[in-house]
Image (cartoon, rainbow, N blue to C red):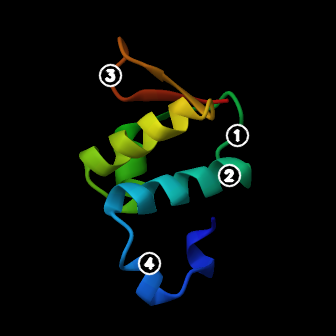
Amino acid sequence: MILAALPSRVKSNLSQSEEAYNQIRSMIVSLELEPGSLINESELMDRLGFGRTPIREALRTLAGEKLVDVYPRRPECVSVR
């Protein structure tokens, strides 16, 4: 689902985690985030305007969908698949 296509009343019903998920997923699908690229949580926070928790929850969901790899020993580091 692309967030920009949703009516504003529907957008307001989404949690920040869901909004972050939709935006990051859209960036992956559109290749704005290229496969194999490394990105960190701080960069996503700055770019999307969300706090750490919504970004982490979104990345956890994307990792479950095998769209990103999260490196737990490298703080804040994520690889796009």
Give the number of the disc on residue 11.
4
Asked whether disc 1 touches disc 4, contact meaning CB atoms under 8 Å apart, the reply is no
Badge 1 marks a residue whose secondary structure is: loop
Residue 26: percent from left, percent from top? 63, 57
Badge 4 marks a residue whose secondary structure is: helix
Find disc 2 in the rendering and name its residue: 32
Neighbourhood count class around disc 1 (C-alpha, 10 Å): few under 14, some 14–19, many 20 upward: some
Q: CA distance from mark 2 to mark 3?
A: 22 Å
Left or right: 34, with 16 as reference point? right
Find disc 1 in the rendering and name its residue: 34
Residue 23: percent from left, percent from top? 53, 59
Give the number of the disc on residue 75.
3
Please name the amino acid that badge 3 sits on: Pro
Badge 3 marks a residue whose secondary structure is: loop
* Residue 20 picture quarter: bottom left
In the rendered structure, which disc, 1 or 4, sits on the residue that comes first in sequence?
Answer: 4
Q: Residue shown at 39%/69% (left/top)?
A: 14
Left or right: 29, with 11 as reference point? right
